[in-house]
Image (tube, helix red, strand yellow):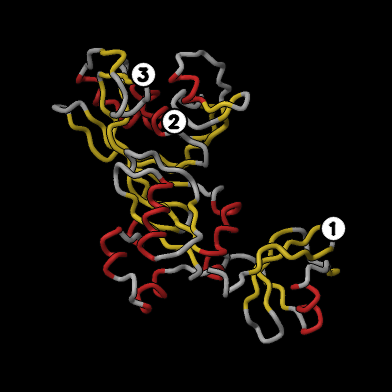
C-alpha cells in the first residue's frame, strides 16, 4: 500500500500516536507524518504510507491554516489549556471591540520566540526538557509570516476569541495567542486549535479513525482516499525520457539536460509516471522513485 492519507487527528493523540493507529488499522509496517500537531490540537495530519515516507522532506515545509480559540484573562506555563495557570489578569470587555484591528497588526513577516514547552533543540536538548527541569535557556526568535488572519467570533461572556490564521511553517499559534492577548492589555492562552489546511490537504478531505476502520478492507475506498505522488506534485514541470535514458535514470546515472535548475516530474517514453528528479547545473539526477512492491 502506497500513498498519502489525510487523517482528522482527534484531540488527545500525538502525531506519532496517530501514525501508529493508522498502521494498526491498515496492518502496514511503514508510515510517517508531516509536521507535528500538539496532542490538544485536531485536524489535518497527512500520513505517508509505504515509500511515500520519502516525500516528507518536501511536504514538511508547507504553509498551514488554523482555527484557534484564545481564552483571555489567564496565562499558562505551556501557552495552552493543558498547562498550569501562572498569571491572571482582568479583561476590559470594551477592548474586545478592537479585536479585529489588533489581529490585523500581526499580518506580515515578523520574529517570534518559540515557546519553552516545544520540541525545538538548543545545545542538543529539547526546550521542554529545560522547562521540566526548571532550567533557563536562551531561545532565539525565528522568522515567520502571517499571510491572513480573520476574526470569526468574540464571546464576551466566556472572554474567548475565535480566529482563523494562515501562516508559514514554524509559526506557533500558542505564542500568537499570547501576543494577541498582550496587545489587548491582558494575558491569555490557546484554548482550542484545529488545523484546516496543509498546502493542498484540506479538512474536508480528512478521514477519522472510525471511518478508516470500517473501510480498511474496502479497496475502492482506499484507492479513492490514498493521494498519489503524481497528484501531490501535479504543479511541477515535466520531463519525458526515452527508453535508454529511462534505464540510465532509474539506475542512478546523471543525465545531461538543458532545463533550468529545480524539481521535475519524470515520465518514461510511454508517458508512465516514474517519480521526481532534480536538475542542477544541467544534470538530471534521480530524486524519489516509488517502488510499488514495497509496503
Residue 163: tell me if it is visible. no
Residue receiving disc 1: 281
Is residue 203 left or right of 166 when viewed as pictured? left
> Measured along the vertical axis of the image, is residue 166 above or below residue 248?
above
Q: Nearer the viewer, mark 3 or mark 2?
A: 3
Q: Residues within 10 Å of mark 1 (few under 14, many from 20)?
A: few
> Measured along the vertical axis of the image, is residue 287 above or below residue 142?
below
Residue receiving disc 2: 106
Dot 3 or dot 2, earlier in sequence: 2
Q: Nearer the viewer, mark 1 or mark 2?
A: 1
x then y, percent, for residue 220: 36, 79
x then y, percent, for residue 198: 45, 52
Is residue 124 left or right of 211 when viewed as pictured? right
- Measure the C-alpha gap from mark 3 to mark 2: 12 Å
Q: Residues within 10 Å of mark 3 (few under 14, many from 20)?
A: few
Dot 1 or dot 2, earlier in sequence: 2
x then y, percent, for residue 102: 36, 27
The residue at the far bottom in this view is 270
Amino acid at each position: 500500500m502506497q500513498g498519502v492519507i489525510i487523517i482528522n487527528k482527534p484531540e488527545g493523540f500525538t502525531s506519532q500516536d496517530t501514525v501508529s493507529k493508522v498502521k494498526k488499522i491498515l496492518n502496514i509496517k511503514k508510515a510517517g507524518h508531516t509536521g507535528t500537531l500538539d496532542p490538544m490540537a485536531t485536524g489535518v495530519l497527512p500520513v505517508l504510507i509505504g515509500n511515500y515516507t520519502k516525500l516528507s522532506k518536501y511536504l514538511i515545509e508547507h504553509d498551514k491554516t488554523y482555527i484557534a480559540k484564545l481564552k483571555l484573562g489567564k496565562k499558562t506555563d505551556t501557552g495552552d489549556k493543558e498547562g498550569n495557570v501562572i498569571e491572571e489578569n482582568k479583561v476590559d470587555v470594551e477592548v474586545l471591540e478592537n479585536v479585529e484591528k489588533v489581529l490585523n497588526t500581526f499580518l506580515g513577516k515578523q520574529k517570534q520566540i518559540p515557546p519553552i514547552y516545544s520540541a525545538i533543540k538548543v545545545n542538543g536538548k529539547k526546550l521542554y526538557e529545560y522547562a521540566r527541569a526548571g532550567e533557563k535557556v536562551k531561545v532565539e526568535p525565528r522568522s515567520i509570516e502571517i499571510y491572513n488572519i480573520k476574526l470569526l467570533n468574540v464571546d464576551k461572556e466566556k472572554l474567548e476569541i475565535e480566529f482563523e490564521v494562515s501562516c508559514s511553517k514554524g509559526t506557533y499559534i500558542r505564542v500568537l495567542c499570547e501576543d494577541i492577548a498582550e496587545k489587548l492589555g491582558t494575558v491569555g492562552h490557546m484554548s482550542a486549535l484545529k488545523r484546516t489546511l496543509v498546502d493542498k490537504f484540506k479538512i474536508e478531505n480528512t478521514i477519522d479513525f472510525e471511518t478508516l476502520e470500517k473501510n480498511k478492507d474496502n479497496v475502492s475506498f482506499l484507492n479513492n482516499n490514498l493521494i498519489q505522488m503524481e497528484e501531490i506534485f501535479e504543479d511541477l514541470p515535466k520531463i519525458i525520457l526515452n527508453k535508454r535514458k529511462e534505464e540510465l535514470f532509474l539506475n542512478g546515472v546523471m543525465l545531461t539536460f538543458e532545463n533550468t535548475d529545480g524539481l521535475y516530474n519524470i515520465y518514461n517514453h510511454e508517458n508512465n509516471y516514474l517519480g521526481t528528479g532534480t536538475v542542477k547545473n544541467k544534470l538530471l539526477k534521480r530524486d524519489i522513485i516509488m517502488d510499488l512492491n514495497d509496503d
